[in-house]
Amino acid sequence: IAGITQAPTSQILAAGRRMTLRCTQDMRHNAMYWYRQDLGLGLRLIHYSNTAGTTGKGEVPDGYSVSRANTDDFPLTLASAVPSQTSVYFCASAEDGHQPQHFGDGTRLSIL
Amino acid sequence: GQNIDQPTEMTATEGAIVQINCTYQTSGFNGLFWYQQHAGEAPTFLSYNVLDGLEEKGRFSSFLSRSKGYSYLLLKELQMKDSASYLCAVGDSNYQLIWGAGTKLIIKP
């Protein structure tokens, strides 16, 4: 079944540790996005990629990095996790910036 | 600055009609999207408006007025499964989506 897969589903992490959230899509979408969703706030864009080989910073990029080595994969790395990064992280993809975004099931991350 | 406003919570009765409003101020406009998000799940796409007017899709309709910076999502013949959060998002000048905080819709029997 075509779609977008995130891993892990959930994770508890000690502060200061490095963590990579994985995202893979098989729809051959050009654009991919990472969001965080916190209670009472809208989805906030962390980083995005309009096409393989390019990335850009969103609204809240500090403390996060991404890479887009190929069309399918768009991992998000927390270099040194802090408690304020506790959130639900969603990866999304779209054919391009004009099209609806399709979301993965999310990763629930708790930083202690 | 960029801003999307929608009510935090609404309550409606099964079988009734409800209208969820969204107002926006963004740098540029490249379409307005509505998404549905059930608790603990991912957002799913409902509708897209880029021109003024009403778009109808089954029980759901979405309206846009670009001059007023205003949209609404209309849900008819409400069902219990429609209990969810409804997210309004606007494409800005860079084709990135700016998201509202969402409206939690509670359906009562």
Image (spheres, coloured by chain):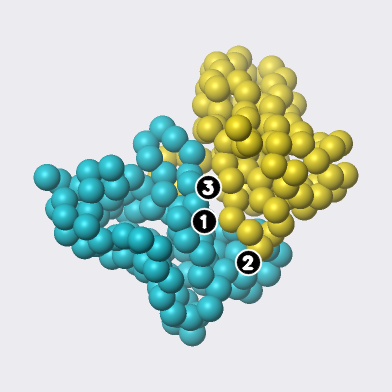
Chain colours: A yellow, B cyan
Q: Which mark is residue B92?
A: 2
For disc 2, the chain is B
Q: Nearer the viewer, residue A83 or A92?
A: A92
Q: Look at 44% across and 75% down and name the residue there.
A: B64
Q: Look at 52% across and 26% down and name the residue there.
A: A108
Q: Look at 69% across and 59% down and name the residue there.
A: A97
Residue B106 on image: x %, y %: 23, 47
Say what secondary structure mark 1 lies in: strand
Q: How far apart are the alpha carbons under marks 2 and 1?
A: 10 Å
Say what secondary structure mark 2 lies in: loop
**Left or right: where does residue A76 sit relative to residue A10?**
right
Q: Look at 38% across and 52% down and name the residue there.
A: B86
For disc 1, the chain is B
Q: Are marks 3 and 2 on the same chain?
A: no
Q: Quadrant of the C terminus of chain B?
A: top left
Which residue is identified by label 1? B99
Up the image or down, A9 lies above or below B83; here it is above
Q: Quadrant of the N terminus of chain B?
A: bottom right
